[in-house]
Amino acid sequence: MLHFDKMTLRDFGPYKGEQTIDFSDRSGVSIIWGNNGRGKTTLLNALRYGLFGVIQRRNGILKNLSEMGNKEAVQEGRYGFTVILDMTNDGDTYKLTRQLKLRPGIVKPSGEEDYEKVLFLERDGSILSPEDRNHELNVIMPEQVARFFLFDAELLQEYEELLETNTSDGEQIKNSIEKILGVPVLQNGVVDVEDCLSNYEKQKSRAARADDKTVQLGQEMENLTANIEEHQNIIKEKQAELSDLIRKKSVLEGRMADTDKLRNWIVQRNEAQKSQEKHEDELETVQSKIRDLMKNAWRGMLLTTVRDLREKIEAEEYALDAKKQKRTVADRFIMEMKKAISERTCPICGQEVSGDIVEHLRAKINESTNEYVGLSEEERQRLYDLQNQMLAIRQLSADVSDVRQGVAHLENRRDELQIAISECRQQIEELHDNIKRYGEDAEEADVLSISREHSDVEQTIRDVRRGIEDENKKLTELKMNKERVAATIDKMAGGTDYRLASRKYELCEHVFRIFEKSKTRYRERLKENVEKDATALFVQLTGDKDYIGLKINDNYGLEIIHKSGRTVPSRSSGYEHIVALSLIGALHKNAPLRGPIIMDSPFGRLDPTHKANIVRTLPGMAEQSMLLAYIGEIDEQVARFELGSHLIHEYKLERVSSMHTEIV
Amino acid sequence: MAESIKTIVLSGQAQAVAKQMNDSGTFPDSLSAAKFGMAYAIKYYWDAVNTSDKLNHLNGVYDSKGSTYNIGSLDPDNYVLQLMEALYPDSDTPYTFTRVLICFGLNKLGDLLEEGRLFPINKVM
């Protein structure tokens, strides 16, 4: 069983200089108290780095390890960092040293390439060769099952995936669960026996071919066997491909989740840029239309002035014209009167005009001549000028229109567009800042290509699965053929060699079936045990009498069972947390591989009662546990009371500066 | 007999306003802005520019430090000439009056520009 005795850090994250945590060789629980930003998750990462050489950040694996170096140490000229783990496993003592240090000859690094990674593993005082070291590390703590030993409890909701079928995350967790439970060992046994079976089958076919009565059938059998092998190989290749693809999909999903916000920002920014360009194009068109209209807008502005002018001239022209007309009428009348005087006869009725009337007519002629004088020569000229002016003025308003309404409409649109452009700019600027701040290390093109790559991988997975189904159908058909041929050979072949080969094959086939059944039964029993142990833990952790247990599914997903026998359909994040802890505890109990549990932020959104329940249950879940909790996450007195003698150590992460934490 | 001048020269101040109006992007060129100024003066300040005497007086007020425009460019279809003849039938200096009206109108538009009230331009049309 793996046990951490001590961890020594040198300039790792905020842990400046050399600092050591003594976990002690005793069984029990250590609590490391630290407020946000002090380095709790960094401690979890120090263990992860020590064991596997990776540092996990919320947004993925840290690419540039040198970033983990203590910033104050760098200012003092010390680059890189070291993690040393002192541990024991099954009676052996180990000292694991992992280091990131400057390459020989480099004093001040200019990039990641100036660092080198160093790894030593001492077992019982002797340094192991790289091959032995890697093998040993893989035996004492395989990376694939690390999730059950070192975990951020805030991420426990990922176990909910186990309730779904065919999700890549769920499949990955299921594989890890089977790995920690030791299922692959039995599976490897099945595969080995299957290989033996295949060899005996070949021997049987060869014997049949050597037998005179079954030469042809033996040949057919061999061909079918070869054919079956070929399809089995294809299926194996496709299954390997499928595993790779599922892993790839999971990585991409992780990256998608990590970069979800960033990708949305980039998409929004690109849309805002497109929108801005579209608005700018329209604005340019509108401006151009305004300029076109404004070229001759001044003519339209003069229309009212021209109209007033025309009305004024028309009035004057009308008055002069009327005066002229009156004179014309009067002239005709005077001419008639003059004729009547001269001829003494009325030109209308033909009667004689008397002397009195002649006098009266003469007076009328004088009166009319004085009253309707007609146009003076000046007035005649004026009328003529006015008429000419009128012609010119009519020209001024011909083909001229008032464009004010058109300009107003365009200016309104221009204002709208300018506002829209300004909003786009502001949005782009804000998004740009967000992208710059959040996605410093991310290449935009990479981020955008993730979802495309993800859908490509999903499509390939569907294709590969379909391919496997097709191959399995062909395989079933071939196997049926083979069984028919084998039955015929069994009836016809009479040679000793064939009978011997056939007996060996049958024996091996029995062994194979035993292995297969054992594997299935082992898996079922494990599941039953995991269900039982998880239920026991769950009941302890919840203390709610309405919930009587957990029910396991094929993926090791756990559903809560109500006392009525029904499953609880949707559960809170707090209960999700408890179910996941119950599963992890049950896995630790049933796994051949044992080790410590190190939990970051172990209490999540739990209430004080459930927090206390977890603390109380923890010593039973693993031989060695470490809790990385912020001060106040759980009442310190409650923790001490619940743990009692199981509490081995308490450490505090104390701030020296924003870049320097001391473990005290 | 109309005057036989071939160019007109704006005042320095009027020219500056025409340039700002052109720079706003609303006018295709300074000359269009200048003619807009002339129309603005006639439409909104007729009482100040309705006689030849007033224009002759103003002509003496404005300097000649602005740009020079060809009559051919200013009035390619003789519209301005006809307008001046219609507005000031007693005058034989239509383009001199045109210059005065442009300078007067642009100065008034310059005041609006200073107060930030020139745009949207449709409000002053």
Image (spheres, coloured by chain):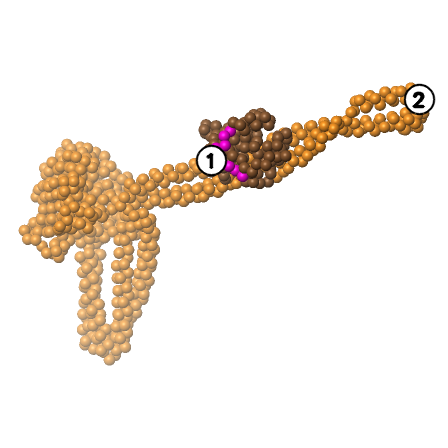
Q: Please provide the residue range marked out in magenta.
A: B62-70
The residue located at (77%, 26%) in the rendering is A374
Question: Which chain appears brown?
Answer: B
In the rendering, at what x and y percent does residue A24 appear? 8, 42
Residue designated by label 2: A354
Question: What element does badge 1 sit on?
Answer: helix
In the rendering, at what x and y percent does residue A527 appear? 22, 50
The three-letter code of the residue at mark 2 reads Ser
Does residue A641 appear in this view? Answer: yes
Q: To which quarter of the image does residue A354 belong?
A: top right
Q: Is residue B66 magenta?
A: yes
Estimate how packed mark 2 is, as few (under 14), some (14 to 19) or many (20 or more) residues with alpha carbons within 10 Å: few
The three-letter code of the residue at mark 1 reads Lys
Question: Which chain appears orange?
Answer: A
**Residue B75 drawn above or below residue A496:** above
Q: Is residue B98 magenta?
A: no
Residue designated by label 1: B19
Q: Is residue A643 left or right of residue B57?
A: left
Q: To which quarter of the image does residue A426 belong?
A: top left
Prevalent SS, magenta region: loop
